Amino acid sequence: MRSMNIPKHVDIVEVGPRDGLQNEAAPLSLATKIALIDRLSGAGFPNVEAAAFVSPKWVPQMADSAAVLAGITRRARTVYSALVPNARGMEAALAAGVGEVVVFSAASESFAQRNINCSIAESITRFEPVARMARDAGVLLRGSISCALGCPYEGRIDPAAVADVVQRMADLGCDGIDIADTIGVGTPGAVQTVFEHTSKVFALERQAGHFHDTYGQALANVLASMQMGVATFHASVAGLGGCPYAKGATGNVATEDLLYMLQGLGVHTGVDLDAVVDAGAFVSAALGRPGSSRAGRALLARRCVATCIPHPTS
Ligand code: HMG
Ligand code: MG
């Protein structure tokens, strides 16, 4: 294979249990959520975004986050992460024993208002006590920046505005920062331009690509980011998800599709694709609809061909 200048290892943060399930009209049972997370950690992900300690009035699907974290079987190699919007959420997240908390803001003022009911500057002020509590408790702190490639309310976002929020998150002491294409409008060149800007204020090795796949660009955007040196990506099993405050946005890049591409490129992830296909089939059955991962569906069909079609006897 022709060699490409891309990282040899990629960390995948599996965000299906949080970003995926937060968008389901009919919430899954607690037992199903726990079983899904256990299947995902069993597949070998270094990080599973398992919960969100947000207002249940805003996102009722995440109201059972404490019970979810109490019910899972912890695996030593997996960090269990959760979203926290404020100090109250942080207290709950720490009590639940998370290994990493995620503070989330946006590169767009309009989206910040709609998603967390405050300005970008106010959100950073809210995160200051959260950051202190994370440091004191010894848990990792990650910052997530929505609408880095475009906003459902404001349209185009200036990459300099993204870099500005990255700088503010870096000043908070974030260990890692996610560049999120909330509505999946980014294309590879635009993604590289954003990373060019953000790399000037925070090491690219500590940034992650969080690409929703609304316009079918997510895998191309992952590859374009890898060519810049980004080596952490978020993905959602079975392509679950969307954002309740970004109408029409679909889920993150499907984990099965991302793994299939990375395997083809010879990039190591430590994640077992077959186990993820199983987890995707499990959650799709629980939701009563087929998963949206193309690779997941193809691999399931191939299994069926191997086991369901009777072999000719002669
Ligand atoms: P608010 O209404 O401005 O704040 O919400 P408030 O302080 O007035 O609180 C409202 C109610 O929520 C109160 O209850 C609080 O006690 C309670 P009441 O007195 O009315 O009974 N409350 C809480 N309850 C539990 N946990 C908490 C908490 N905080 C307050 N932590 C707030 C402000 C930030 C709380 C709200 O806007 C919120 O929870 N927003 C979260 C929205 C959200 O979760 N969005 C989806 C996740 S972000 C995302 O998907 C994007 C991402 O994937 C990246 C990308 O793709 O872009 C990360
Ligand atoms: Mg998202």
Image (cartoon, rainbow, N blue to C red):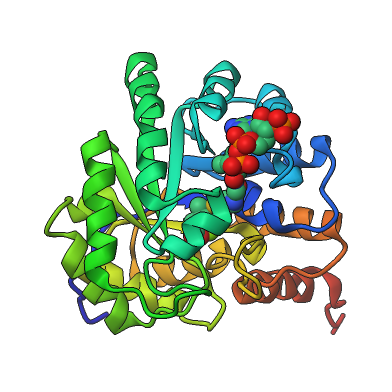
The quadrant of the picture occupied by the N terminus is bottom left
Lateral position of residue 138 relative to residue 210, left or right: left
Lateral position of residue 101 relative to residue 20, left or right: left
Query: With respect to residue 76, does 156 lie above or below?
Result: below
Residue 264 found in image quarter:
bottom left
Residue at image coords 44%, 80%: 155
Rendered-image quarter of ligand 1: top right
Lateral position of residue 113 relative to residue 190, left or right: right
Q: Is residue 54 visible?
A: no
Question: How far from the left and from the top, in percent, is residue 62?
Answer: 70, 41
Query: With respect to residue 198, does 185 lie above or below?
Result: below
Residue 280 found in image quarter:
bottom right
Query: With respect to residue 313, does 132 lie above or below?
Result: above
Label tally: 0
Residue at image coords 49%, 44%: 45
Question: How far from the left and from the top, in percent, is residue 36?
Answer: 71, 44
Residue at image coords 82%, 35%: 31
Question: How far from the left and from the top, in percent, is residue 59?
Answer: 70, 47
- Residue reaching furthest left? 200
Q: Is residue 284 visible?
A: yes
Question: How far from the left and from the top, in percent, is residue 119?
Answer: 43, 51
Query: With respect to residue 86, does 187 lie above or below?
Result: below
Residue at image coords 55%, 61%: 255
The quadrant of the picture occupied by the C terminus is bottom right
Q: Name the one closer to the observer, 269 or 125.
A: 125
